[in-house]
Image (spheres, grey):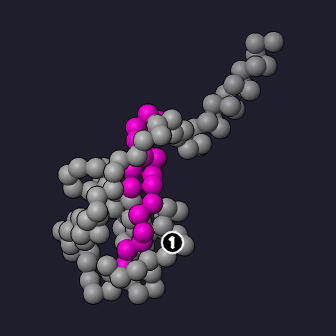
Amino acid sequence: MRLLALPTICGLLSACSVMPTPQFAGASIPLAADYREAARKVAAQMSFVTASTRITAPRQLPGETALDPQRWYVCMSDRPAGTHDLIVIFYGGGLPATLDAHGSPLCVGLPSAPL
């Protein structure tokens, strides 16, 4: 009987590994009023900002753990076609973090505006 339960438990555990992290914290890190300028600065440090750079509206991202507050992010593009190349994540203080966003599901299909 125990041997039959083992594959079921292993199957359930592997299914859990592909599920998103649950979010128990209802809190959210405040979004700074100057988030566009903060995103521009961090992107400029990477030589990412051009005359055609576009930015999406801020969206929320789950915290790093289930108990951490939700964070904010924007997607940025320097291509006229609107392919988003950079995710800027705001942690509530200090410099925002950046991630390569090429093809990221966090950015696909989001409308953007000139920076």
Question: What residue is disc 1 on?
Answer: 110
User: Residue 43 or 103: which is nearer the viewer?
Assistant: 43
Determine the residue positioned at 39% across, 59% down: 73
Give x and y (percent) for residue 68. Answer: 40, 38
Instruction: Using the image, determine if residue 76 lies above or below residue 53.
Output: above
Left or right of 8 on screen, residue 107: left
Asked if the magenta segment contains residue 55, the reply would be yes
Quadrant of image for the C terminus: bottom left
Left or right of 54 on screen, residue 12: right
Quadrant of image for the N terminus: top right
Give x and y (percent) for residue 12. Answer: 68, 31
Give x and y (percent) for residue 49. Answer: 25, 78
Determine the residue positioned at 29% across, 69% down: 36
User: Mark 1: which secondary structure?
Assistant: loop
Instruction: Using the image, determine if residue 11 lies above or below residue 1.
Output: below
Left or right of 11 on screen, residue 112: left
Instruction: Using the image, determine if residue 2 lies above or below residue 94.
Output: above
User: Residue 21 or 101: which is nearer the viewer?
Assistant: 21
Q: Which quadrant holds residue 40? A: bottom left
Type of amino acid at the residue the image marks with label 1: Leu
Q: Which quadrant holds residue 64? A: top left
Asked if the magenta segment contains residue 28, the reply would be no
> Dot 1, how many residues are within 10 Å of its Cα: few (below 14), some (14-19), or many (20+)?
some
Residue segment shown in magenta: 54-72
User: Residue 109 or 69: which is nearer the viewer?
Assistant: 69
Q: Is residue 99 visible?
A: no
Q: Is residue 40 visible?
A: yes
